[in-house]
């Protein structure tokens, strides 16, 4: 049992192997046979199509020639009509001459306006076809043609009709009617068969049949060679549209069936097919080797692609004309453009507009053979959203397998994060340095406050002692001296308060705040402000709204803020080009922040305005930075300390351009409101 199954299985395996081996060859042989039959069939079809094209072209030329002949005949008839109308008689000799020249005409007739026959001349080449009484005025074909000619004021044709003769034969004819301006008609009778003979070239009739037929296919007249048995018919037909009648002009060509002409072609196709099979065998072997090499190459390319996609360094390749041929995903993510937007471009879209010309020159130098630096070079690129970012570029030539340079490969490192870290480090260093300087200033302020307290106390004591010594004297000099001593004592006490406030401010101790009227704050600083204003020639204008509430503040520190801002304003106007120097001090309630509720918090705004040269943008960005100053003798701490004092009171210190020139510094302080109040119209007080 087992011995009989094994040979059967082996035979089946051999048959399957044999079938698999020869299946493709059988399929190829069948395809070659189909190809050969298709080529022969296409050759015959091509020949038939060529014959049909030639016949269509000949038919169109013959129809054009026929139309031209009919038009020339109409012109000849028009000349005869003119001569007849001018002579008022029928020119028999001229009509006979025309009939001799145009054999397609059978008869020429002259008729009056009622289509009655006045005169007629028959062709000399045929026996008379028409009887006199058979061509009356009521003949329908002539009537139709002449009626159409009258409407068109041009020659018109009648429908074709059959005319028999006495011998029992007949002809298919049609008439052309020409109207006369003087009244009457000239009628010419055409023989359709003679028209084909005379007006169609003999070459078209040779080996073909030329036919006049109705549009429905009814044959009217024909000339040429009749169809032979065993031939293939090629037909071409076109409409002959004449005024009053439409005929079909048809040409039937007789051609023998195309031979299996390519006996040579068949042998050639067979030889080519055998050669094709041989080439396919060789190609199959070569294809196996190529498939193996392609698989290895695909693995290598996939490995390289994975490496290129995983790196964070941008890669870009350019050819020798500067066109981008390759970019990796890291480069696309770096500049924000897709590979489709970059590949093929010469002037890259990631070049900044202001640097595009410079980069183009650098690229031209690189294409010209300039060697890039080995350690790379820095540049600035632009992302798709317009943001600029620094990059470090390394370039190397691209060399192909033949050792020829095909372009340049560039590697890009985005330096944005490195620059950001460097900027953070630099800012941290600056903050540390500023903190160290502030600590030093704090220590100096503490030391100065400690060292100056005793001399100021001594000054106050000496002033008090001097007042005691002058207490009993009443003359004028003694009174003035007593006033000076009191002023010295007051300023010494004020200096002590300032030193104590600065000491508390530096040590960040809780400072005592008290309600103070805005007028009192201004009065406290005005003596010192007036002294500097008189020295610099500045006029001081004070605008103080009436019925203003008191502010809750550290009086000494706020007075120092006012004093610092007024001094800065007057120094800003200390320029030779400024002739009119005006300092404006204004105190008002903040508009839009007043709440009618009694318990609501109110704010007062203090403004110091000058008409100096103003503050430019570069200075404005760093105006409140500690230790930044535009004066050679300044420390750069005044405005920074003023802003800190105002913000510790809960307010804000701002500045803005003055109109028409100058700068306005504004700061707000919290007000104490006991009851609601209404603000009357502002009053202006001037103090110079």
Image (cartoon, rainbow, N blue to C red):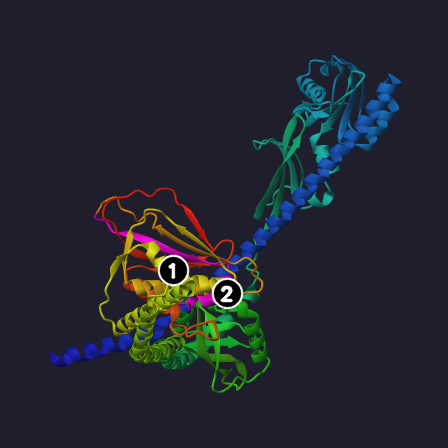
575 drawn magenta: no
Q: Name which residue lies at 40% across and 74% down.
A: 627
Q: In the image, residue 155 lies at what x, y percent?
A: 73, 25
Q: Residue furthest left?
A: 1
- Give whichever of 508, 64 is nearer the camera: 508
Residue at the spot of label 2 = 535
610 drawn magenta: yes
Image height of 433 relative to 30, above or below: below
User: Label 2 to label 1, Cα distance in Å?
Assistant: 28 Å
Q: In the rendered image, is residue 562 in sight?
A: yes
Q: Name which residue lies at 72% across and 19% down.
A: 150
Q: In the image, residue 240 lies at what x, y percent?
A: 65, 34
- Mark 2, secondary structure of its residue: helix
- Mark 1, secondary structure of its residue: strand
Q: Mark 2 or 1, which is nearer the eye?
A: 2
| 21 relative to 69 in the view: left or right | left
Report the label total: 2
Q: Name which residue lies at 78% across and 28% down.
A: 126
Residue at the spot of label 1 = 654
């Amino acid at each position: 049992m087992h011995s009989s199954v094994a040979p059967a299985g082996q035979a089946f395996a051999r048959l399957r192997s044999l079938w698999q081996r020869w299946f493709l060859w059988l399929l190829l042989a069948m395809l070659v046979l189909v190809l050969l039959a298709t080529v022969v069939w296409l050759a015959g079809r091509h020949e038939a199509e060529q014959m049909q094209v030639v016949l269509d072209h000949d038919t169109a030329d013959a129809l054009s020639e026929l139309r031209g002949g009919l038009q020339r005949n109409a012109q000849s008839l028009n000349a005869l009509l003119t001569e007849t109308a001018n002579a008022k008689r029928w020119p028999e000799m001229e009509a006979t001459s025309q009939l001799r020249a145009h054999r397609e005409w059978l008869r020429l007739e002259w008729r009056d306006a009622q289509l009655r026959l006045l005169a007629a001349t028959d062709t000399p080449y045929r026996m008379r076809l028409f009887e006199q009484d058979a061509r009356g005025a009521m003949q329908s074909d002539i009537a139709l043609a002449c009626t159409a000619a009258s409407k068109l004021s041009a020659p018109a044709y009648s429908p074709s009709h059959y005319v028999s003769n006495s011998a029992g034969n007949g002809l298919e004819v049609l008439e052309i009617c020409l109207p006369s301006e003087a009244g009457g008609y000239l009628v010419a009778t055409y023989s359709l068969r003679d028209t084909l003979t005379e007006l169609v070239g003999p070459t078209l009739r040779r080996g073909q049949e030329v036919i006049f037929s109705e549009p429905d296919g009814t044959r009217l007249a024909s000339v040429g060679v009749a169809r032979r048995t065993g031939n293939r018919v090629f037909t071409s037909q076109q409409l002959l549209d004449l005024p009053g009648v439409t005929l079909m002009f048809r040409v039937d060509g007789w051609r023998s069936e195309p031979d299996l002409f390519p006996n040579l072609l068949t042998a050639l196709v067979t030889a080519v097919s055998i050669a094709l099979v041989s080439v396919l065998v060789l190609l199959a072997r070569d294809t196996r080797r190529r498939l193996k090499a392609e698989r290895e190459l695909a693995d290598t390319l996939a490995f390289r692609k994975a490496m290129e996609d995983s790196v964070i360094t941008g890669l870009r390749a350019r050819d020798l004309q500067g066109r981008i041929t390759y970019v990796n995903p890291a480069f696309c993510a770096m500049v924000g453009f897709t590979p489709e937007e970059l590949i093929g471009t010469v002037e890259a879209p990631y070049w900044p507009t202001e640097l595009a010309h410079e980069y183009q020159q650098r690229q031209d130098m690189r294409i010209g053979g300039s060697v890039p630096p080995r350690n790379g070079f820095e540049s600035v690129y632009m992302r798709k959203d317009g943001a600029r970012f620094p990059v470090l570029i390394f370039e190397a030539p691209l060399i192909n397998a033949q050792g020829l340079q095909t372009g340049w490969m560039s590697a890009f490192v985005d330096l944005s994060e490195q620059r950001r870290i460097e900027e953070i480090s630099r800012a941290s260093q600056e903050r540390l340095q500023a903190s160290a300087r502030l600590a030093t200033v704090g220590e100096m302020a503490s030391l100065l406050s400690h060292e100056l307290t005793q001399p100021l106390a001594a000054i106050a004591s000496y002033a008090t002692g001097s007042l005691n010594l002058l207490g009993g004297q009443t003359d004028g000099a003694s009174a003035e001296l007593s006033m000076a001593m009191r002023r010295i004592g007051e300023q010494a006490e004020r200096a002590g308060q300032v030193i104590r406030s600065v000491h508390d401010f530096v040590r960040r101790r809780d400072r005592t705040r008290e309600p103070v009227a805005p007028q009192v704050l201004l009065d406290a600083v005005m003596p010192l402000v007036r002294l500097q204003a008189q020295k610099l020639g500045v006029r001081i204008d004070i605008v103080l709204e009436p019925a203003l509430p008191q502010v809750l503040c550290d009086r000494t520190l706020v007075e120092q803020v006012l004093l610092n801002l007024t001094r800065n304003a007057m120094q800003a106007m200390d320029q030779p080009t400024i002739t009119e120097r005006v300092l404006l001090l204004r105190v008002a309630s903040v508009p839009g922040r007043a709440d009618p509720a009694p318990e609501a918090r109110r704010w007062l705004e203090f403004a110091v305005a000058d008409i100096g040269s103003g503050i430019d943008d570069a200075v404005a960005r760093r105006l409140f930075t500690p230790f930044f100053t535009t004066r050679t003798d300044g420390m750069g701490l005044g405005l920074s300390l003023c802003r800190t004092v105002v913000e510790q009171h809960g307010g804000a210190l701002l500045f803005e351009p003055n109109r028409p020139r100058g700068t306005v510094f504004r700061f707000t302080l919290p007000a104490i409101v006991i009851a609601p109040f209404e603000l009357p119209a502002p009053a202006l007080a001037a103090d110079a």
